[in-house]
Image (cartoon, rainbow, N blue to C red):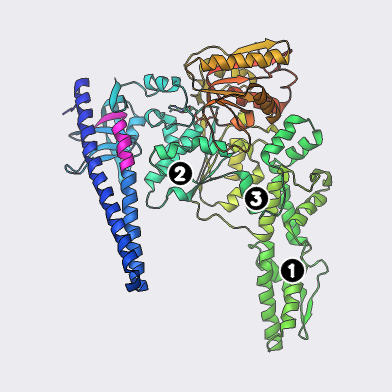
Amino acid sequence: MMINSTEQEEREYLEEIKEKLQLTLIRVDDTVKQFSAELRQNKQYIYENQSGMDEADMVAAGQSINRMAFTGESAVAKKRKLYKLKDSPYFGRIDFIAGQERSPIYIGIYSFADDSQRANLIYDWRAPISSMFYDFELGEAWYKTPSGTIQGEVALKRQYKIREGKMEFMIENAVNIHDDILQKELSKSSDDKMKNIVATIQRDQNAVIRNETAQVMIIQGVAGSGKTSIALHRIAFLLYRFRDTIASKDILILSPNKVFADYISNVLPELGEEHIPEMGMDELATELLEDKYRFQSFFDQVSALLEKHDAAFIERIRFKSTFEFLGQLNRYLIHVENNYFGAAEQEIRVAGIVVPWPFIIERLRAYHRLPIFKRFPEVVKDVLNYVRSNTKRKLTGGEKAQIWETIPRMFRLGSAFDLYKDFYKWMGQEHMFRQGPNGALEYADVFPLIYCKIRLEGAKTYDDVKHLLIDEMQDYTPIQYAVVSRLFQCKKTILGDVSQTVNPYSASSAEGIQQVFPQGDTVKLFRSYRSTYEITAFAQHISSNPNVVPMERHGQAPEVLRYNTNQEEAQAIKDLIERFRNSDRQSLGIICKTLQQAEDLYQDIKGPGVHLLTPDSTSFSNGVVVTTAHLAKGLEFDEVIIPFASSRNYHTDVDRSMLYIACTRAMHLLTLTYSRDLTTFVRQ
Ligand SMILES: Nc1ncnc2c1ncn2[C@@H]1O[C@H](COP(=O)(O)OP(=O)(O)OP(=O)(O)O)[C@@H](O)[C@H]1O
């Protein structure tokens, strides 16, 4: 039997559900009030009776308060979810027939059950049964549960747009989710944070989100294909599916910068999950090097490349970004193992006996699984035993100290830094290692040095992290992945787009990353959702990828505007900002090549509602944002202006990458301005 078949019935049903939500809300509200009253009373009681309580009483009282606060907190969280549901209880419905029974499955952002009837009224989009909403049209269908596959038939499929408790529209049996509703969703203007996409997740995206088995999932997706969205929904899914073993705090996002972290910070809370810890690669490096070395940041490296074409600098970066380099370093470390112990092959004379060299080297080799420096204490212990059993007496403090000192000295190098420098000597490539004027390391040396340090001293591992998410994977080199794979043994989701590298001299492709994680599953996404057909086509001329499938969403063709002088151009940009202000678009990104250009332009055009985004910014705001392509990575704007698109400004490979990234940030409108000659990367 089919319930709620007509639109009228659906509308009435919506009212019914809202009422039930309201009732539950009142109940939860009472609980919250009751808890806070009890909590207050309890605290008061402790306060008043402190002197009469012994330690055990205090502990017990404290625990009971904690328990209550915890229950109170979860009631507050529940309330928050109920409010959200009241606003928009569900977005989809399928009727599933299994055997004789036909069940309507309403799907929403969270689940909601009617306690009195013990029935699930709304299913969480992550529930096993909800997967059919994304995976099937009408007809035969199935879903997997932990206890097996359930077969049946989807007899009805509906989508709803419910906002502020009102049904705006309802669509029946849409052939495919990406039709009408998706088009509507995509044509909306963006606000300042990334949004959830649960109502319109596409089939290929759903497969990635719900993959439970991959140890390492590598997602290569073209600009705007929803990689970041998918990765966040995947996290939400894993938190739901494995809620007994993984909590939000067990996940780590390695993100390119704070602004990006802020930009995506909304999605998981919107999906009812807590905020996820995040960290930048540079931060990780500082932590691993224990703050002992100064180094250039990734941003500085890219800025240096944009400012000046320095062939030797580029060669050093290129050299250190290959698999060959990682291979060389590994070969060098084997060489070190074989040749750097006991240069003089000396025996130890102590306590009247001789500890022979073959014994010592055999012990050193026996611990080859340990980092080099960690082997020494083990070997010392073995030598102490050897001496003891040969002298049959206790050793004096001086004798012991002699052994403790001698063993580490048998290794030729004293620190990771020495080791790393010696590597270049060993290769006969000493010119490939350069330090900055104040001794700062180049960015390209940071992770190789960390790798040496790990092999020499070991490193703390991040065992408390149970899932690692790495965004912008193309910006990390094989050696960075080698370090990451040693530190994080957990499951990983790694995503990016090789065409969007900010440093073409050190970009990694999915295939390259797969080499570091042979157990990884690679998924490729080609459909681009962000930009209009016209913008995607325009960006394709700058950096072509024949596999991109643009959305059939049309808009104005990008404009390329020429001016005679810089002054004219600056004035034109001001006019364009004015045009934006008079439009209904919410966000405008003015994306420059370098930070200097962004800062200078900002001085020219600054005013209320105009923000400058720098590497030090920590939050992303709506309105007009002036920034660089590097910092705009991962973000999107309704409208984008790219100033100074001249041939003087954009001519190297790095410039081309920047221009591509900048163009692909635009959702609805793109304008390039230049004075004198247009860059050859743009075809008019
Ligand atoms: N299934 C979908 N339904 C609705 N919107 C979607 C869907 N998939 C992606 N989008 C939208 O497309 C835009 C791009 O998504 P996202 O930023 O996740 O892509 P990306 O691949 O990480 O992009 P880039 O690499 O270019 O930064 C976002 O506005 C997102 O909301």
Residue named by callout 3: 286
Quadrant where the N terminus sits is top left
Q: Position of residue 539 (x, y in %)?
A: 60, 20
Residue 363 is inside the magenta segment: no
Sequence-first tag of 3 and 2: 2
Quadrant of the snapshot with the C terminus: top right
Q: What residue does disc 1 label?
A: 408
Q: Secondary structure at mark 1?
A: helix
Asked if the residue at tag 2 contacts the one at tag 1, i.e. Cβ–Cβ closer than 8 Å, the answer is no
Instruction: Give the secondary structure at mark 2.
Output: loop
Residue 90 shown in magenta: yes
Give the left or right position of residue 330, taking residue 344 as reference. Answer: left
Q: Residue at x 58, y 53 (%)?
A: 487
Please state the horizontal and vertical placement of residue 89, each as a whole percent of the image: 29, 32
Q: Residue furthest front?
A: 48
Answer above or below: position of 575 versus 133. Answer: above
Q: Please state the horizontal and vertical placement of residue 44, each as a whole percent of the image.
A: 31, 61
* Image: 52 above or below 111: below
Whether residue 603 sits left or right of residue 495 in the image: it is right
Residue lying at the far bottom of the rendered structure: 393
Q: Which comes before the other along the chain, label 1 or label 2?
A: 2
Label 2: how many Cα within 10 Å (few below 14, some 14–19, many 20+):
some
In the picture of the structure, the residue carrying the numbered disc 2 is 275
What type is the residue that disc 3 sits on? Answer: Thr
